[in-house]
DNA sequence: GCCATGATTGCAATCGATTGCACACGGTGA
DNA sequence: TCACCGTGTGCAATCGATTGCAATCATGGC
């Protein structure tokens, strides 16, 4: 910076102000300095800047994946979320740090490096940490949570309308003429619980009876999911439609159904949830309720940036929408 | 730090040295200082530290995805790579920054923030940047590339044996009795080219003829891939096995085959490439050549850390291995 | 010509950790 | 007595950018 200052015949202070577009500096001087900086490939030393300003440009993303639900961090849904956040943060010129350690204790978390040296926090999922997150809600560190609206929640939340999503999925199957619709999911995770509520609401609206035998607990992980599904199918239940709580479960379901010599969608129709891109490649193509992860990521980042800048921020409920994928029937 | 120093009755200098485990400090003093720091929730200010030491703990991951090949950055393969690198870097207490901007000009890249303020560089794929990467190879900034061994490559490389992988995939189909094996992929990407070489090598070894009509250019992106595959199948080619260059292409292939009323694997066997976890959920389950992304990520990080610490580092060729997934036949 | 005024710019302190060098200490041998 | 030793600590400078305040400049009004 001294070098640029010498070249421009000004002091370091002026260079600093010029590069920060301070109104205190004459426009002509400013232009000259910027020009010189450019020519001489000068880039500001962010470490020094962050040090001086006692801040960082780093947003930490905390994955609260609930060990009870066993959703792996390699779940495509979470990976897409990470990738989308990465993109959204990059647009705001923020760096991203990812922590896979759920927040289990607000007090000790406050002493962590992450807490002390992040500009803000994006928390993915609430896991078992609802109380801890509430405790952190009014700290000086801005925080936005992606999750499910919860009783007495004090933190800022971006969520999708899981109940509506479950309802849409179920309605789609009803429109296709399904009468005996099963629900595959693990209701110990809050979002799945809401989707289940939507499922029941749709059945009720269509005046279809709710058969508890068709409410099947299917975990997210592969092997367990297949076991649960096979166990259900082995009992030869009367079922002609399945609402699945994730696209991965839907894939498992299709696979198990076909192994049971049931045709999809002719014998049993299946709908997924999440809107992962590979659902367009499954066979048959899988209709799904799209969560628009990218949009959620942008909303999370926008909210967080708002908080960082001291703006008023509202909780957001992102829409879900059904993606219908039809086989392009050939022959 | 001054506070801790006062409590311990020493100077800041001593506290600093103690916390860095300097041998210059007496063990008893060291223990006392560490104890006090712990009790008073003192954590070192990394910004100040990085500033003083003129370094950072940030490794930048540059995605060189080749726009010509149209592999999206949301490709599950890359997302898994990112997630794995994240994990591997975290184990080495390094932060990760991701850049989606391919390096197209070494000179201007040297002036970028990324270049100046990273501890090291992990480059994913070579894209069109082989020459640029070579230019950066002997810079002071440590760099490791994940990609394909290339003529005259001067940078450190971690790669998988794509030729061997292509060969294994093909041999697997040959063992299953396939005689007319097609290759689905886009050879404008170097790794696909190598897999194709492996495919040909396997055919040759098995004394099967290479039929150029069965060498099908299938792009990575969904719609284009389906179009290409359908076009191929519409011509009613004689084919009983398909080696696919990615699991996603394999999914598309299965989907198109079934729409053409061809049974998988009875009429046409399909094998994928990458070893993505959802292949165990496809119907039928998809055998695939596993690249062990996690292992690759660890090798990349290990090599980079080696370079950062000034150690001698070797190029690494990670093994690939076939994952055979069988339908658990029921009924 | 002089001064008040507002617009620019420079001075110098500051952020927190690190580190080269100097110093203190008690003991040793000349 | 004194130079010298090794060990353990403290002093003070340093990294590069920012910013409150003081200094300077140009201008117009008198």
Image (cartoon, coloured by chain):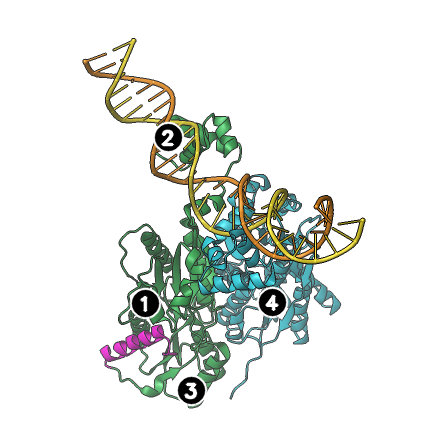
Chain colours: A green, B cyan, C yellow, D orange
Q: Which residue is mark 3?
A: A232
Q: CA distance from mark 1 to mark 2?
A: 45 Å
Residue B172: give x, y in percent of width and height: 66, 73
Q: Which residue is mark 1?
A: A134
Q: Which residue is mark 2?
A: A25
Earlier sequence position, callout 1 versus callout 3: 1
Residue B266: give x, y in percent of width and height: 58, 77
The reply to whether residue B12 is visible in this rendering is yes
Q: Which disc number belongs to residue A148? A: none
The crowd level at tag 1 (other Cα within 10 Å; few <14, some 14-19, many 20+) is some
Residue A265: give x, y in percent of width and height: 40, 76
Q: CA distance from mark 3 to mark 2?
A: 73 Å
Side (left or right) of B200 relative to B61: right
Q: Which disc number belongs to residue B292? A: 4
Residue at image coords 69%, 57%:
B315
**Magenta range:** A186-207
């Amino acid at each position: 910076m001294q070098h640029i200052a010498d070249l421009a015949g000004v002091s370091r202070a002026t260079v600093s102000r010029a590069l920060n577009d301070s109104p205190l500096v004459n426009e002509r001087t400013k232009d000259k300095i910027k020009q010189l900086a450019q020519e001489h490939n000068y880039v500001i030393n962010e470490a020094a800047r962050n040090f001086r300003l006692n801040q960082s440009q780093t947003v930490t993303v905390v994955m609260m994946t609930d060990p009870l639900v066993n959703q792996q961090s390699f779940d495509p849904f979470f990976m897409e979320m990470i990738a989308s956040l990465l993109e959204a943060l990059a647009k705001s010129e923020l760096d991203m740090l990812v922590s896979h350690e759920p927040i289990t204790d607000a007090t000790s978390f406050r002493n962590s490096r992450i807490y002390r040296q992040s500009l803000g926090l994006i928390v993915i999922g609430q896991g078992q940490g609802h109380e801890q997150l509430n405790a952190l809600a009014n700290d000086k560190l801005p925080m936005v949570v992606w999750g499910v609206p919860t009783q007495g929640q004090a933190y800022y939340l971006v969520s999708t309308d899981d109940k509506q999503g479950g309802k849409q999925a179920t309605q789609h199957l009803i429109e296709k003429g399904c009468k005996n619709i099963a629900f595959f999911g693990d209701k110990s995770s809050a979002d799945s619980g809401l989707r289940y509520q939507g499922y029941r609401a749709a059945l009720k609206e269509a005046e279809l009876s709710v058969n508890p035998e068709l409410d099947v607990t299917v975990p997210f992980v592969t092997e367990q999911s297949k076991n649960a599904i096979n166990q259900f199918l082995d009992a030869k239940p009367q079922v002609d439609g399945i609402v699945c709580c994730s696209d991965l479960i839907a894939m498992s379901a299709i696979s198990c159904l076909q192994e049971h010599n049931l045709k999809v969608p002719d014998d049993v129709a299946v709908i997924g949830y999440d809107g992962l891109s590979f659902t367009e490649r499954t066979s048959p193509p899988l209709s799904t309720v799209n969560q628009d992860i990218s949009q959620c990521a942008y909303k999370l980042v926008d909210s967080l940036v708002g908080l960082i800048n001291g703006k008023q921020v509202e909780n957001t409920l992102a829409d879900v929408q059904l993606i219908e994928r039809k086989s392009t029937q050939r022959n």
